[in-house]
Image (tube, rainbow, N blue to C red):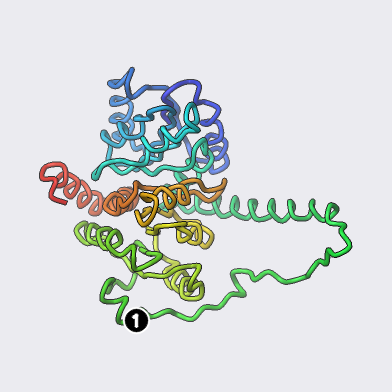
């Protein structure tokens, strides 16, 4: 279900619609304002949830409270697409991403309707093989497009010192990885004895441990299995790649990082599964990490949470897994209710 805060947002919605058509995913679209037609939004969301809608997408500009109001009225995942109207769209982006604990909203880049739809497709694809196949085909199309773009540049590279180097790209079949084993220092911070985890949690640095431990604490409370690691794709790429190979069968990833936050970008480069990003406040109030995560190019969305919002990252993971698992859905709803009642988390 796509909800627009205004009919003027339809140009962004068209990007999402084109993707959903390609993915062969049924959708509906309505215009409803969180402020001017609050009851309409509530009715649409509640009825859609009862009727089996799996993912909601809220597209709005300015203060952009629409995705948050959607999240307040459903236990299904909500994807936010902020729209540039004023301030370069930063007002809408912050209104979407900085949600309080208990109401997670997965925010993609400003005006990135296509990434919103790709993220929604990844979520639905957790339990839908046909959608996963369509996503894989689209990923290959993006690869070939980049390859063609490079070929177009060759005619422009005529300088006397231009010297083209031929090399062979490794395919997924040609790559081999050693299985990585956590060392004792890592195990003291991250513990998981699940042989087939649903979630992989990756922190980019030990400075991100506090947020990462809150994330795994919430996963534990909702009985969601996970594996985890501290690894930087920049400082230790082999270790990072080994772990990605080790957990290739998980259903989704949670990447936690501050500063330039390359972890999320590295994870989405290796997988077609949903990637939840949690930016950490290390420098600049976490603003650098937030922008690095949310402002991804077309085709590789990151479901970005608010700064230091490890709890919401875990809750959003539970929403995704709950689509195909009644027990996990019940665990999530009970935990979310306890947060709302006590505020102790």
Taking the spot 43% from the left edge, 29% from the top edge, the residue there is: 60
Farthest-out residue, left:
342
Taking the spot 51% from the left edge, 37% from the top edge, the residue there is: 113
Residue on which the image places disc 1: 183
Q: Is residue 194 visible?
A: yes
**Relative to 339, is 271 above or below?**
below
Residue 59 in the image, given as x and y percentages of width and height: 44, 31
Taking the spot 26% from the left edge, 33% from the top edge, the residue there is: 73
Residue 91 in the image, given as x and y percentages of width and height: 41, 33
**Relative to 176, is 299 above or below?**
above
Residue 267 in the image, given as x and y percentages of width and height: 48, 61
Residue 109 in the image, given as x and y percentages of width and height: 48, 42
Residue nearer the viewer, 59 or 329: 59
Q: Is residue 183 left or right of residue 341?
A: right
Residue nearer the viewer, 73 or 53: 73
Q: Is residue 212 left or right of residue 140?
A: left
Quadrant in which the N terminus appears: top left
């Amino acid at each position: 279900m796509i909800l627009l805060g205004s009919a003027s947002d339809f140009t962004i919605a068209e990007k999402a619609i084109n993707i959903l058509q390609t993915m062969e995913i049924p959708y509906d679209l309505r215009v409803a304002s969180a402020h001017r037609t609050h009851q309409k939004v509530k009715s649409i969301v509640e009825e859609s949830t009862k009727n089996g809608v799996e993912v909601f997408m809220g597209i709005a500009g300015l203060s952009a409270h629409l995705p948050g109001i959607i999240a307040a009225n459903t236990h299904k995942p909500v994807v936010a697409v902020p729209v540039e109207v004023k301030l370069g769209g930063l007002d809408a982006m912050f209104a979407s991403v900085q949600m309080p604990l208990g109401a997670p909203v997965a925010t993609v880049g400003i005006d990135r309707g296509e990434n919103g739809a790709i993220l929604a497709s990844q979520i639905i694809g957790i339990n839908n093989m046909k959608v996963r196949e369509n996503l894989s085909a689209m990923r290959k199309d993006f690869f070939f497009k980049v390859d063609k773009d490079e070929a177009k540049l060759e005619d422009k590279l005529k300088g006397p010192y231009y010297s083209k180097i031929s090399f062979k790209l490794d395919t997924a079949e040609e790559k081999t990885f050693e299985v990585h084993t956590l060392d004792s220092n890592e195990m003291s911070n991250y513990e998981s004895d699940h042989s087939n985890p649903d979630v992989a949690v990756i922190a980019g640095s030990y400075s991100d441990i506090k947020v990462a431990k809150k994330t795994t604490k919430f996963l534990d409370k909702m009985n969601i299995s996970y594996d985890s690691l501290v690894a930087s794709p920049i400082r230790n790429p082999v270790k990072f790649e080994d772990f990605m190979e080790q957990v290739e069968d998980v259903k989704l990833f949670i990447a936690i990082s501050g500063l330039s936050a390359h972890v999320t970008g590295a994870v989405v480069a290796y997988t077609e599964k949903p990637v939840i990003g949690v930016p950490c406040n290390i420098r600049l109030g976490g603003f650098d990490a937030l922008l690095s995560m949310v402002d991804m190019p077309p085709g590789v969305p990151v479901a970005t949470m608010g700064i230091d919002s490890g709890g919401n990252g875990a809750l959003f993971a539970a929403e995704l897994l709950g689509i195909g698992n009644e027990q996990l859905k019940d665990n999530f709803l009970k935990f979310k209710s306890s947060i709302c009642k006590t505020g102790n988390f």
